[in-house]
């Protein structure tokens, strides 16, 4: 497998607070890798560091063989790394289609219509609401829109930050089915998720974060059957 992302010895601080403590992990092309852990474990901070929104004091981040540790966030997007942030953060005053078009700003525009149709096929509800103002969509629809917007940039790696947050169980099932479909279509995914059961059900590999440290790693199946993980995260 080709290694698409390698994070080595990351240490990240919020002022005096040591949020990420020497973590290292990899993502291979074609995988779904998930980071699970309790609220405050450092999962979202890890994604923000990879995407250039925060900086590690030590170590390095390599994306497609290039060190991106000090590359500005907007340049990282141009290199093919897209993030769907926690809380969705769509452009509330713009239409569904306009939001999707914003996701394609790094592209030439030649394939815009084809890319829109690809997203509409994956998210039929977005096709139905293409002219609707994003702020009037439900939480689940906004999550679909944020994911579709990220796909418009043709990412080599798609990072999803808590895609199930605040959604009803039936919508969580729908979102994870879409994640499976994106993976099947060839998208490499780094997933941060508090819903450990759902995350491990789709993951090729997984890491457990606890208070800024990686405490366990393995395949999704291995961690789903781990007694320690079951007790801590799966209600076992």
Image (spheres, rainbow, N blue to C red):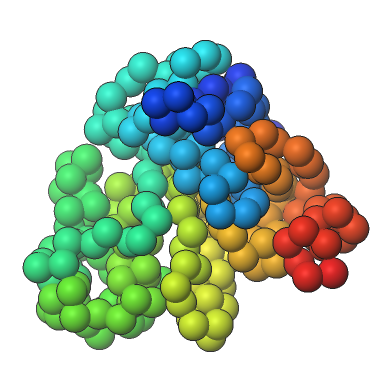
Image location of residue 172, percent across then percent down: 53, 76
Q: Residue at x 65, y 67 (%)?
A: 198
Q: Quadrant of residue 156?
A: top left
Quarter location, residue 126: bottom left
In the image, taking residue 137 as reference, residue 219 lies left or right, namely: right
**Image quadrant assignment for residue 29:** top right
Measured as percent of width and height from the top left, residue 66 is found at 46, 18
The image shows residue 211, relative to residue 113, as above or below, that is above
User: What residue is rendered at 55% in x and 82% in y?
Assistant: 169
Is 171 rendered above or below residue 13? below
Instruction: Name the residue located 42 percent from the left edge and 30 percent from the top edge.
Output: 14
Residue 93 location in percent, x, y? 9, 68
Residue at the (33%, 61%) spot, across then down: 88
Q: Is residue 79 above or below residue 40?
A: above
**Residue 165 appearing in the image:** yes
In the rendered view, would you say 96 is above or below 7?
Answer: below
Give how far across and how far down residue 32 sits, in percent. Answer: 62, 51
């Amino acid at each position: 497998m080709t290694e698409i992302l390698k994070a080595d010895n990351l240490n990240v601080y919020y002022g005096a607070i040591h949020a990420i403590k020497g973590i290292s992990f990899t993502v291979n092309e074609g995988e779904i890798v998930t980071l699970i852990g309790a609220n405050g474990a450092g999962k979202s901070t890890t994604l923000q560091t990879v995407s250039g929104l925060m900086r590690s004091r030590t170590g390095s981040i390599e994306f497609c063989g290039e060190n991106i540790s000090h590359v500005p966030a907007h340049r990282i997007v141009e290199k093919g790394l897209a993030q769907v942030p926690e809380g969705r953060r769509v452009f509330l005053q713009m239409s569904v289609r306009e939001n999707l078009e914003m996701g394609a700003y790094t592209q030439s525009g030649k394939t815009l219509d084809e890319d829109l149709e690809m997203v509409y096929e994956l998210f039929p509800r977005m096709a139905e609401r293409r002219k609707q103002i994003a702020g009037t969509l439900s939480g689940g629809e906004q999550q679909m829109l944020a994911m579709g917007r990220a796909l418009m940039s043709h990412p080599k790696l798609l990072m999803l930050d808590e895609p199930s947050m605040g959604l009803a169980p039936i919508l969580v099932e729908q979102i994870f089915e879409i994640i499976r479909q994106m993976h099947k279509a060839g998208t490499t995914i780094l997933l941060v998720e508090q819903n450990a059961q759902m995350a491990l059900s789709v993951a090729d590999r997984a890491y457990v974060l606890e208070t800024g440290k990686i405490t366990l790693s393995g395949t999704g199946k291995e961690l789903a059957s781990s007694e320690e993980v079951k007790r801590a995260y799966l209600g076992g």
